Image: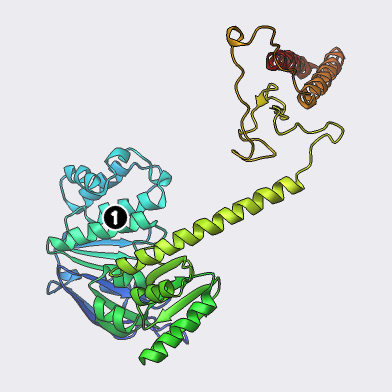
Amino acid sequence: MIQAFGLTSNPRKDLPPAVDDVSFEAHAGRVTTLLGVPGAGKTTVLRLMLELQQGRGITYFRGRPLHRIAHPSREVGVLLGDVPGHPSRTIRGHLRLLCAAAGVPVRRADEVLEAVGLAGLRDERLGALSRGMDRRLGLACALLADPHTLVLDNPTEGLSARESRWLHDMLRAHTAQGGTVLLTTADPKEAARTADRVVTLQEGRVVADQDAAVFARTRLRPRVAVRSPHAPRLAALLTKEARTARRSVEVVPEAGNRLSVYGSSCAEVGEIAFRHGILVHQLADETGDMGPGAGEGACAGADDAVTAVGVEVNRAAGDSGQRAGEAVLADAEATDQPTHPETPPPADDQPRVDETPGGDGEAVGSGDHGRHGAPGDRAPLPPLPPPHLRPPGAQPPAPAPLRATACRGYQHRFRHLCSRADHLRNHSRTPGSYRAHSAAPVARRVAAGAAVAARRARGGAAGRAGVR
């Protein structure tokens, strides 16, 4: 248990103290969070508690001030900022050094590495750690002497959602064993979601000391986030329904076809949207100032309504998506022009040759993916019967006129590479120049590329003969 009484920092020149008469308690088996915006005095409070900064007031850790504890590291585990250490030192070496300083066996270093998931990185250098790995190492340093109390300053700063969940799970496991956890954060949503008690600081003073449930209900205003292309119509319907039922519901339009509905629930908003056939793209509970785009999770306790709205959303989204896709295809076919206007495009029932150089002149069926169409927009060509099943005297169909774009591209590329190779060969014979030493290898590579282009051109001609 932590008891802080009258923590006050020394006043600065012509400025009030950063922390003024801060008192609170953090009970064992619970997570206590100091909440406040940057500059509210959270870090200063922790430094005053740990006697790292001069000031007034006193803090008791299980009934004793820190300077009266024989082995402070075995009572309080601390994480303030980044992990201090030489960047060339390994993780295991750093922990073994701290073990010697704290007077604990060196095998404890391997135990905490296993606990925080860094056993596979024990030989990694401190300077090469990412932000998430640095936070894990900091927690390992705090747990090294198996302390009863953990004091962490903004431990989730810069972490991903997955790393933050892992960290809070570790802290919950510590409190489940009877330990005390005190941490700071500037995110009210995180405090309401992960803490058992929230102490709110503002300008160095305690303005609220509440349980997490009371904090979420009184200090954070819950709302329903709705995103719909018909947001104005939905807002009018929600206001009308609330006026008819004589309920206090506030609908606040926001940017991006988004509504914030206060005083209602996901189930009620979903039912109203379903009855009037309104398409809904987002329907979720939010707490606090989460901003646009938040609320990724679905609303708990309203699965039936969300499912009903989801059926209509999927149905309408499928129809609108199909219409949008058809419009995009029609626009692409209307605006797309052939690369060479003098060559007529192939007919719908004729094979097409890939225009891209390097495509080896392959014939592309009309039902495949092409540059001027989508799959399935033309009927595939029927396969030709084998020669032994053809009627007597029947001749294979005449080949359709092919586009010579691929062949032209290969010829142009072949001529260009050959001319460049000749230039480099002639230039490499010039003595005394700097490029004479490097032009010969380049010429050989260019000549090899020209040979490859020639083989591809011959292969494309053979492929077209096979198509015929």
Q: Nearer the viewer, residue 424 or 141?
A: 424
Which residue was labeled with disc 1?
Answer: 166
Residue type pointed to by label 1: Trp
At which x and y percent is residue 243?
Answer: 41, 91
Few, some or many C-alpha atoms within 10 Å of disc 1 (few <14, some 14-19, many ≥20)? some
Figure quadrant of the C terminus: top right
Residue 120 in sight in this render: yes
Tell me which residue sits at (83%, 20%) in the image: 420
Asked if 396 appears above or below 299 in the picture, the reply is above
Q: Nearer the viewer, residue 329 or 358?
A: 329
Tally of numbered discs: 1
Asked if 125 appears above or below 59 in the picture, the reply is above
> Residue 415 occupies which quadrant of the picture?
top right
> Residue 398 occupies which quadrant of the picture?
top right
Q: Is residue 413 left or right of residue 268?
A: right
At which x and y percent is residue 235?
Answer: 49, 80
Q: Nearer the viewer, residue 55 or 223?
A: 223
Q: Is residue 24 left or right of residue 378?
A: left
Tell me which residue sits at (48%, 76%) in the image: 259
Residue 57 in sight in this render: no
Q: Looking at the image, what colour scheme do you see?
A: rainbow
At which x and y percent is residue 331?
Answer: 71, 51
Figure quadrant of the N terminus: bottom left
At which x and y percent is residue 264?
Answer: 36, 81
Asked if 279 appears above or below 137 in the picture, the reply is below
Q: Nearer the viewer, residue 159 or 433?
A: 159
Tell me which residue sits at (19%, 43%) in the image: 106
Q: Secondary structure at mark 1?
A: helix
